[in-house]
Amino acid sequence: MKTLIVVPTYNERDNITPFMDQFLTHVSGADLLVVDDSSPDKTYEVVKERALVEPRVHLLLRTQKQGLGKAYAAGFQWGFDQGYEVIVQMDADFSHRFEDLNKLLHQIPAHDLCVGSRWVSGGGTVNWGLLRKIISRGGSFYSRLILGFPLRDWTGGFNAWKAKTLQAIDLPSLVAEGYGFQIEMKYRALKSGFDVKEVPILFEERRVGQSKMSSGIVLEALKSVWKFRLWKA
C-alpha cells in the first residue's frame, strides 16, 4: 500500500537530519512528508536540501504557525492529493521509535486505524515523571468515560490511518484547534464504526530540545471532549 509518514515540525533543526537518516535506513516502502510552519530555526531548509537528492523525502512549507492540528490536516490533504493509501502521524523528536513505526505499518493493512498505544499490555513510557503519567493516563480514562469507547490511549499522536478512514471522518469540520484533535479524530473513527486496533509502543522522552507538550495543553484539550460528542457520523 502506498504509504506516507507525516511529520510536523517547528524548530526541529537539531533533530531533523538524524531523523531523516534513520527513517531512510530503518523504514522501507514508505515516503516522508515534513510539514514545517516556517520554523525560525529554518528546519525547512534542511528538509528542502534533502528532498532535492532523496525522492522519498518531501517538504510542505506553511507560511505561519497555526497549530499541530492544522499542520496535520494540511499534510493529510497533501497525501490524499498524491494518492497515498496509508498515512501515519509521527513526531520528529525521537519520542516515537522506528521499530514501533514498523509495527504499525505491519498491522495497518488489516485495520482502518492503528493507534500507537502506551497504555495497553506491552506499551509504556521512558523517562516520564509521575505527574505526566497521571495526567496522560487520567486524560485517556476521562475520554474513555465521556466518549463511551474502550480505547486505552486517546491522547497519543503516533497513529497509522487508512486514507479512506481520514477522509470519512470529515477533517474540515473538526472542532478541536489544538492537541484535542488527537482525541476527536479517534472518536470520529470509532463512532463511524471503523476497525481500530491498539498497537503497543514505547514512548521515549525527546532527545534534543524541550517538549512542546505541557500539562496545561492536555487539560485544555480535555475541556473539549464534551463537544466531540455532538458530531454525527
Image (cartoon, rainbow, N blue to C red):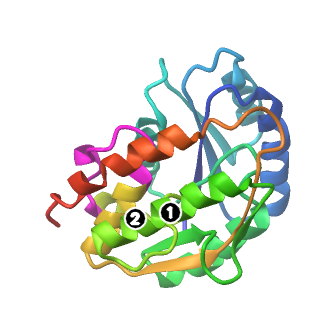
Q: Is 106 one of the magenta-colored residues?
A: no
Left or right placement of residue 192 versus residue 160 in this view:
left
Q: Which residue is mark 1?
A: 138
Q: Nearer the viewer, residue 99 or 1?
A: 99
Residue 168 position, x and y percent, is: 27, 63
Q: Main secondary structure of the magenta part?
A: loop
At which x and y percent is residue 84? 48, 58
**Neighbour class for label 1 at 10 Å: few (<14), some, many (≥20)?**
few
Query: Which residue lies at the image location 33% right of the left edge and 65% below the top edge?
Result: 187
Mark 2 and mark 1 residues within 8 Å of each other at the beta carbon? yes
Instruction: Give residue 149's mark.
Output: none
What numbered label is drawn on residue 142?
2
For this rendering, which residue is in front, 21 or 53? 21
Residue 41, x across and y down, in percent: 72, 17
The foreground one among 60 and 215 is 215
Q: Which residues are magenta?
A: 168-182
At mark 1, the secondary structure is helix
Task: Calculate the distance from the C-alpha at mark 2 to the C-alpha at mark 1.
Answer: 6 Å
Q: Residue furthest top?
A: 40
* Quarter of the image where one finds residue 134: bottom right
